[in-house]
Image (cartoon, grey):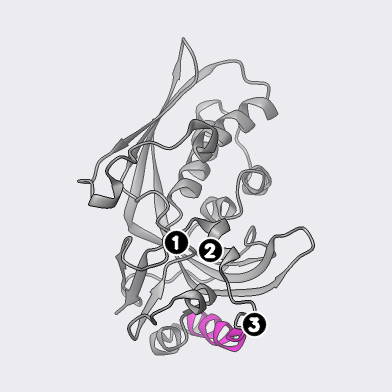
Amino acid sequence: MKITAYAKVNLCLDILEKTPSGYHEIRTIFHEIKNFKDILEINKTKLKDEVSIAHDLKKSPDQKGKTEIKLSENLAKKALDLLKKTFNIKDFVSIKIHKNIPISSGLGGASSDAAAVLKGLSELFKLNLSEKRLLYLAEQIGMDVPFFIVGGTALGTHFGEKITKLSEINSALLNVKIFPKSSELKEKTRKAYENLDLSKYGQNKAKTELVLKGIETGDKKLIIENLHNDFETSLKKPLQKNVHLSGSGPSVFTCI
């Protein structure tokens, strides 16, 4: 079977506090981008479980030499292992990821792939898992994975894994244009959080409320004027007007 894994941007990202566990509590608005996607081929196989990545886009200079990631860090593999263990599945599975979403770009590609694996295996093995059960499994894999179970536009709270569905924003209202790997912020999520100036975060919560209102009412101007991301406080050089980080990674986006 083939299943699609879409990218995302964070229209708003408020970092609220650092918890005793070391994780940061956040409040964010996820938005799925349908024209940026990976395609996964998922099939039963007789020999062993296999997860492979094929890069379908022409490699940019910063992707050369980074065509693979460690299997132990592959969220699609973690999703496969978790689902097989949870439901005591003995069959072997082959997963081939046709990768169009750049790795470590802040666009959620790995998390989206993992969610696609959970949904695909539910269908492949006729488990008929409910959205609630899929969300429970997704939380065990990564904090962005639950959003991709729901998709569309959604509010993420706690560490981002608690998802509340919002009115979906279609491209006719808000056309999001992505520029992968175009900013100075190149660290992965953990490093990005470590580099935050904690005195500057959490200052734009009122803007998030206005974006939520704009989503509910279909007010494009209200949405665009209040987009923000607390990771931008770590940038040495401010981004151009109406350009924002897509998440905790180096991609940026603008809305028209």
Element under disc 3: loop
Residue 197's x, y, as percent? 59, 77
Q: What amino acid is at disc 2?
A: Ala
Which is more toward the observer, 182 or 175? 182
Callout 2 touching callout 3 (CB < 8 Å): no
Residue 180 to residue 1: above or below? below
Callout 2 touching callout 1 (CB < 8 Å): yes
Q: Residue furthest toward the top?
A: 47
Q: Residue furthest toward the right?
A: 20
- From the image, give the main secondary structure of the stretch colored magenta: helix
Q: Residue at x 67, y 49 (%)?
A: 132
Q: Marks 1 and 3, Cα distance to the nearest angstrom?
A: 21 Å
Q: Residue furthest toward the left?
A: 58
Magenta range is 202-216
Q: Residue at x 34, y 51 (%)?
A: 102
Residue 19's x, y, as percent? 76, 65
Quickly name the residue at label 1. Answer: 249
Q: Marks 2 and 3, Cα distance to the nearest angstrom?
A: 15 Å
Which dot marks residue 199? 3
Element under disc 1: loop
Q: Quadrant of the C terminus?
A: bottom left
Which dot marks residue 192? 2
Q: Marks 2 and 1, Cα distance to the nearest angstrom?
A: 8 Å
Q: Earlier in the sequence, mark 1 or mark 3?
A: 3
Q: How many marks?
A: 3
Q: Residue at x 49, y 14 (%)?
A: 48
Q: Residue at x 35, y 71 (%)?
A: 253
Residue 206 part of the magenta-drawn span: yes
Residue 95 part of the magenta-drawn span: no
Residue 234's x, y, as percent? 50, 75
Q: Earlier in the sequence, mark 2 or mark 1?
A: 2
